[in-house]
Amino acid sequence: MKLTDEEKKFIKTVKPEVEKFLKTRTPEDVDWGVGSFILSEKGKIYHGVPFPAARTIHGEENAVGTMVTEEGLDATIRIILIVGGGQEPCLPCGMCRVAIYTYATDKTIILCSDIKLENIKKFKIKELYPYPHEGELSSGNENSPESGI
Ligand SMILES: [Zn+2]
């Protein structure tokens, strides 16, 4: 799929952040990937990096957490750009697909990129997570506390 002007603009906007991250981190940090950048429906940008804890927290989950910290549980993702640590586009793991799905709408765009922001694949959440564990993808999100997620 071709990138829209909005998607190209978002990539251009976060590119300096990617370059700053690469300049200021150790090679080990970069091995983990640059992390994920979210453009929320409210127009704010959030960066989440991967980090080791009891289990490895991936950048996608961390970026979603940062968005939810700022905007609350009804926040939704307009675009998420996942920047891996290598030459191939980084696709989200199963847990991150659930995290994205939980805060996605049917309009959410998932951009999976290499470290140089040159090799980018574009998806909708239905393509990456076609059969959710619970319910069907609706136009709104289903992440209210009442839903049990
Ligand atoms: Zn993951």
Image: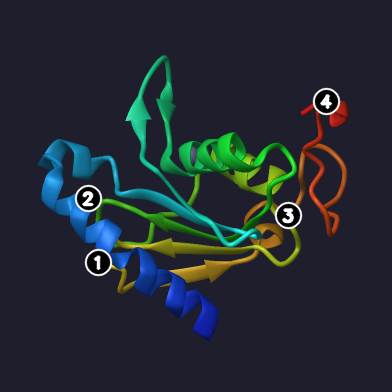
Mark-to-mark CA distance, 1 and 2:
12 Å
- SS assignment at label 2: helix
The tally of labels here is: 4
**Pointer 1 and pointer 2: residues touching (CB < 8 Å)?**
no
Q: Report the mark closest to the observer, 2 or 4.
A: 2
Residue topped by disc 4:
148
Name above or below for residue 61 compared with residue 44.
above
- Residue matched to label 3: 130
Element assignment for label 4 = loop
Q: Which comes before the other along the chain, label 4 or label 1?
A: 1
At 65% from the left and 65% from the top, the residue drawn is 124
- Within 10 angstroms of label 2, few (less than 14), some, or many (20 or more) residues? some
Return the mark for residue 21.
2
Mark 1 element type: loop
Label 1 neighbour load within 10 Å: few <14, some 14-19, many 20+: some
Give the CA distance from mark 1 to mark 3. Answer: 29 Å
Q: Residue at x 15, y 42 (%)?
A: 25
Confirm whether residue 9 shows in the render: yes
Quarter of the figure with residue 26: top left
| Colour theme | rainbow
